[in-house]
Amino acid sequence: MANILIVDDSAALREVLREVLSDAGHDVGEAGNGLVAERMCKQKGYDLVITDIFMPEKEGMATIRDLRKSHPKLKILAISGGDSVTEPDTFMNLALRYGADGILSKPFEHAVLLKEVGRLLRSPRV
């Protein structure tokens, strides 16, 4: 159905998301941070990137901003559980301003993820 890249520093979360998305028929790649994700996006055409906000080496906001510049039609879904001080909504709204097309706060149900992925893949990116 679609080529999707999951970007998160948690290998366990990437594995779960990969299984959910693969079971739904998608081709799924994984990256542990934004630097790896950017390299992968240059090598392969992805339809959607699902990226965490807080990661080492290159965090999600910079990843969203840079992917939006280099791949303007790429769909981007930001995911985050926030940090110990700030509510997740603060970062999610900022992610939208940086260029994300959708947001999900962790934890989320698999059905919610699949619904949002479907919505993003159906909607045109102008």
Image (cartoon, grey):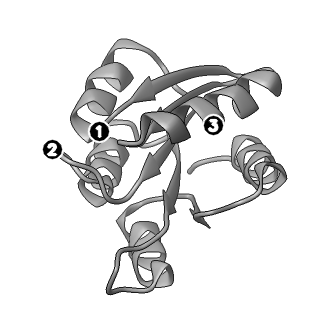
Q: Is residue 13 left or right of residue 98?
A: right
Residue 29 at what x, y percent from top left?
Answer: 51, 21
First of labels 1, 2 by sequence position: 1
Rendered image quadrant of residue 84: bottom left
Q: Mark 3 or mark 1, which has the lower sequence index?
A: 3
* Mark 3, other Cα within 10 Å: few <14 / some 14–19 / many ≥20: some
Q: Is residue 1 visible?
A: no
Q: Circle 1: is it few (<14), some (14-19), or many (20+) Cα within 10 Å?
A: many
Q: Residue at x 69, y 61 (%)?
A: 108
| Distance Cα–Cα, label 2 vs label 3 | 21 Å
Residue 124 appears left or right of 6: right
Q: How dense is the environment of label 2, judged by Cα within 10 Å: few (below 14), some, or many (20 and up)?
A: few
Mark 2 residue type: Glu
Q: Residue at x 35, y 65 (%)?
A: 98
Q: CA distance from mark 1 to mark 2?
A: 7 Å
Circle 2 is placed at which residue position? Answer: 57
Q: Secondary structure at mark 3?
A: helix
Kindly check if marks 1 and 2 are in contact, taking CB atoms under 8 A apart as contact.
Answer: yes
